[in-house]
Amino acid sequence: MDPVSVGLLLAVAGGVGGAVGDQTWNGLSALVRRPHQHSSNAAVTDPSGVDELVALQQTPTNREVATRLAGVLQARADTDARFHAALQEWLAQAKVAFPGDGDVHNQISEPFRSSLDRATRVAVTGEAPGPLLM
């Protein structure tokens, strides 16, 4: 299984991505809150990840909390085949929503001029009956 990316968790927690980001966060929340299906040799006291999820929601830029959550998710996936499959599915969807390990890059692909830029380039000719307001 691919390791759970701390950068991806931080991007999802940070509220980036609008509606898609919200859906991704909700999917992670639902996944973490699923009941454990331990294998016979797993300890019943394994953390679920809920505490780490709540902490990350409260401090969405906290790399240490995201690292702890990533570790818990990995540990749960190692002991629960259903959780492993669900986590893989969530990771695939999250990587589509947040490509590049959760890094967000805004790019404008064509020449861009703001309305302010256009307004400052307007030439005014003729006589105005009063003061010209811009």
Image: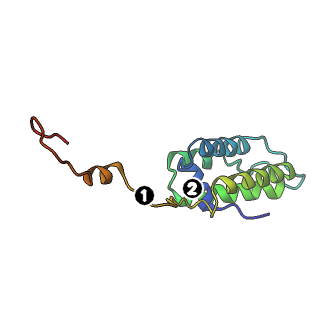
Percent of width and height locating residue 23: 65, 41
- Check the image and report above or below for 49 versus 133: below
Question: 25 or 38, which is in the foreground?
Answer: 25
Q: Could you tell whether 67 is left or right of 45 in the image?
A: left
Q: Mark 2 = which residue?
A: 10
Residue 74 position by quadrant: bottom right
Picture quadrant of residue 26: top right
Q: Secondary structure at mark 2?
A: helix
Percent x, y of residue 75: 75, 58
Disc number for residue 90: none
Pick the quarter of the image with the C terminus.
top left
Residue wearing tag 1: 112
Tell me the amino acid under the disc marked 1.
Answer: Phe
In the displayed structure, does residue 104 sit left or right of residue 134? right
* Colour setup of the view: rainbow
Q: Position of residue 99 (x, y in %)?
A: 64, 60
Q: Earlier in the sequence, mark 2 or mark 1?
A: 2
- Determine crowd level at label 2: few under 14, some 14-19, many 20+ residues with C-alpha closer than 10 A: many
Alpha carbon separation for disc pair 2 and 1: 30 Å
Kindly indicate whether the residue at mark 1 contacts the one at mark 2 (C-beta within 8 angstroms).
Answer: no
Q: Residue at x 23, y 52 (%)?
A: 123
Q: Is residue 126 left or right of residue 92?
A: left
- Looking at the picture, which amino acid does disc 2 mark? Leu
59 to the left or right of 126: right
* Residue 3, x across and y down, in percent: 72, 64
Specify the farthest residue to the right. 40
Q: Residue furthest top?
A: 129
| Residue at image location 59% in from the left, 57% down from the top | 66
In-front residue for pair 41/98: 98
Instruction: Identify the residue at horizontal 42%, vertical 57% (top origin).
Output: 112
Looking at the rendered image, the quarter that the N terminus falls into is bottom right
Instruction: Tell me the SS state at disc 1.
Output: loop
